[in-house]
């Protein structure tokens, strides 16, 4: 678990240092800037709540992030997950803590419709195990406190309704699951 926590922390630190480096790489003249110009950086909070229907289960996640500008958001994304494993006849309830980065591609002058891609990495820890058969013995391949790497890419489409209030949906591809996600944000 220490290794996964250190990996997550190092990725998050790398993302924050990348944002700082990118903001300082400003070129003068009529050349395009390689990073974010000082005029381009506008720190604003962004929150989302999403439901996931995945194979082999479902979950709820929330993101707490900072919009660097109209195209980039970084932050943390905790979640609660329930999965059912048919082969083992086992239900696993877990929670996750993830660092994420989101990239938007906007359409139209008012940016009502946007495509986005969320990339997240973190840890998932089992807090409850339910066995269909050997519930008294508690034997099986899963145990309370098991820790897994949770990494996913979640592309989707976003429809902005008013100011920053929006709804979104798309597929989810993760290290332990795949499925669909949908939610609201502000």
Image (tube, rainbow, N blue to C red):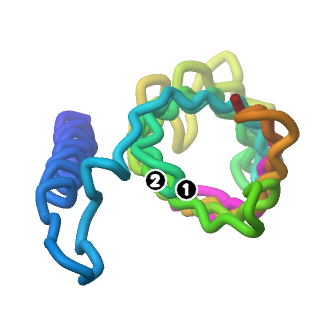
Comparing marks 2 and 1, which lies closer to the viewer?
2
N-term mark: 2 or 1: 2
Label 1 Cα crowd, 10 Å radius (few <14 / some 14-19 / many 20+)? some
The vertical placement of 19 against 130, above or below, is below
Report if residue 173 lies within the magenta region. yes
Q: Quadrant of residue 129?
A: top right
Image point (81%, 54%), residue name: 112
Report if residue 18 lies within the magenta region. no
Viewport quadrant of the C terminus:
top right
Q: Secondary structure at mark 2?
A: strand
Name the outermost residue toward the top: 136
Magenta stretch: give its range: 170-182
Name the outermost residue toward the front: 29
Viewport quadrant of the N terminus:
top left
The vertical placement of 40 against 4, above or below, is below
Q: How many marks?
A: 2
Q: Quadrant of residue 161?
A: top right
Overall secondary structure of the magenta stretch?
strand
**Mark 1 lies on residue:** 118
**Mark 2 lies on residue:** 72
Picture disc at residue 140 = none
Q: Tell me residue 30's x, y (percent).
A: 26, 81
């Amino acid at each position: 678990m220490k290794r996964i926590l250190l990996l997550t922390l190092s990725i998050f630190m790398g993302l924050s240092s990348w944002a700082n480096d990118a903001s300082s790489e400003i070129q003068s003249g009529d050349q395009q800037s390689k990073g974010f110009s000082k005029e381009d950086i506008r720190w604003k909070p962004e929150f989302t709540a999403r439901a996931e229907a995945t194979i082999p289960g479902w979950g709820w996640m929330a993101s707490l992030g900072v919009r660097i500008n109209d195209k980039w958001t970084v932050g943390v994304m905790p979640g609660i997950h329930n999965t059912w494993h048919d082969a083992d006849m086992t239900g696993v309830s877990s929670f996750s803590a993830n660092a994420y980065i989101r990239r938007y591609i906007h359409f139209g002058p008012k940016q009502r419709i946007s495509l986005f891609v969320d990339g997240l990495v973190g840890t998932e820890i089992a807090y409850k195990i339910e066995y269909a058969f050997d519930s008294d013995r508690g034997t099986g391949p899963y145990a309370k406190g098991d820790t897994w790497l949770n990494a996913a890419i979640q592309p989707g489409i976003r429809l902005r309704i008013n100011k920053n209030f929006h709804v979104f949906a798309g597929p989810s591809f993760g290290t332990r699951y795949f499925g669909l996600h949908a939610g609201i944000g502000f």
